Amino acid sequence: MSSTAAQKWPPPANRLLKHAHSPWLYSAGLLALGAIHALAFAPGPLPSWTLPFVDIFTLAVLAKVVFQSSSVLRAAGAGLLLGLANFSVGVYWLYISMHSFGGLAAPLAAGAVLILAFVLALFITLASALARWLSARHLGLPANYRWHLLIAAVWASCWTATEWLRGTLFTGFPWLNIGYAHVEGVLAGWAPVVGVYGLAWLSAFAAGAVALLAGAKDNQNDAAAAITVGAAIVTGLVGILLGHIGWSQPHGEPMVIRLVQGNVPQTEKFDPSRMLQGIESYMRLAALAPKEPDGAPSLIVLPETVMPVFQDRIAPQIWEQWLHIAKERNATILMGIPLHRNLNGQDQYTNSAIGFNASTSLSQLGAATLPMAYDKHHLVPFGEFIPWGFRWFVHAMQIPLGDFNRGAPRQRLFQINGQAFSPDICYEDVFGEEIIRSVRDSEVYGPGANILVNVSNLAWFGNSWALRQHLQISRMRALETARPMIRATNTGMTAAIAPDGRVRAALDPLHKGVLDVEVQGATGLTPYVRWGNWPVLAWTGLFLLWGWALRKRVPGGQQGDDTP
């Protein structure tokens, strides 16, 4: 970028550029920015109302640096540094699972987290480089609000496209999608319309607009940039209006549901000598009498792998105790358990959730031939299946249950008290485009879900950000589908979430207890449930093509945008 162009970016907005001659200060600033951005994905230590602002303004600084960069390569480097810090801090809790519970040496566990953070940061690198390449020539032209709008839209589209790639390639890892910073705030009302990727586009557009306004110096640039910021503000105002639309309607009668959090330490959960103690602890919690006579739960939900061995290895006496609890409480029990079946002469092992009541037979439980059974579809790499070439890495850790079969994308829902429940297991609710399948009607399985259920065991990650980040993700799924979401977890966060994403009630993490809550099922389809990610992907692709086409028509020169 020419010195004339650089002068358009005055202090203090230009501080990072001023330190560009000092690689250490420049790099440290971007790394600090990425670490701050990692705080935007769940409340604590920051209050929830600040998260949208932290996301937008940290990305605005990155956008500013990208727009100022003297080359595509320099823009890519800025994205890499911010992304490396963002993901290293944001998913630091993976170190806990690999080192504390997986037995991996501390240097290897820390190295694995850094390698993963580097790989994930490559997507931000790509977004930054592509945005710089597509926008550079337009930045060198005389101020025009149309160019400013295009530049902000191209930046948002580059970011959203790479977010989608990160959430899709190699089974996907969409954790820390910037849309999750906007579960609350003015953009949250867009979630039922455009989903989390649409929120990511709107957030990135706002960041790009702020970056352009911060870089404006003369009156003509001020006016053009102000129009772009105004467009971002309009999207927020529309979001507020959308948030007042009732996308779903009550279905059936409300029912009391008990969510159980046993807080069984991970060191004990899979220890054969202490496994039975954990199961008995969950039995006692499930069997508790209701606090009020008219508050008896008709459904008791227990976490993922509450029974940590395959169902056919569990003594009939234990199953009889569970059936006795179901009879005593006059309730259906929904729990997570690994299942072993023999289908057509082949053994199949699945991470599953089952539902049963007092009329269920021991033979059905032992053979896993239950009417209500769900097999996890989206498996976790390394935890539930071993990617090709990485078996050595899994063998280096001491984590059980390493290789499962995959369930079907759409399965039969659990029909309980006139409500259709859609279970998903732990990591699965990170994929909104998969969750909406169960909300849609099916020619094979009938009407879609009225209530979403997530069963998880996050004890692998201690009392870390993973618990709060996962709750934030579940809140987004409730917003997108306009369905209540209930969560039963081993250590947290066990919670009941309303269709508008509000947390109605929750248990404190790392505490033992039950949460009895009244839940009203819902029906009706949001635009996002109907159309999924296709509108956002089409919108994103259109702006990328538009930016590329106009780039070819605009002569190069002032920005030196073809400089590598």
Image (tube, rainbow, N blue to C red):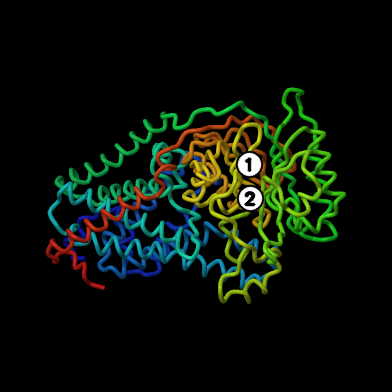
Q: Please report the residue visible at 69 percent of the width from the left and 47 percent of the height from the top.
A: 354
Q: Which residue is mark 1?
A: 414
| Residue type, mark 2 in image | Tyr
- CB within 8 Å, label 2 to label 1: yes
Compute the Cα span from label 2 to label 1.
9 Å
Q: Secondary structure at mark 2?
A: strand
Of 375 and 182, the residue lying toward us: 375
Check disc 1: other Cα within 10 Å, few if <14, some if 14-19, many if 20+: many
Q: Please report the residue visible at 66 percent of the width from the left and 66 percent of the height from the top.
A: 402
Asked if residue 276 lies left or right of residue 256, the reply is right
Quadrant into which the C terminus falls: bottom left
Check disc 2: other Cα within 10 Å, few if <14, some if 14-19, many if 20+: many
On the question of residue 357 being in view, the answer is yes
* Number of numbered discs visible in the structure rendering: 2
Quadrant of residue 256 in the image? top right
Quadrant into which the N terminus falls: bottom left
Q: Which residue is mark 2?
A: 374
Where in the figure is residue 262, as x and y percent of width and height? 75, 45
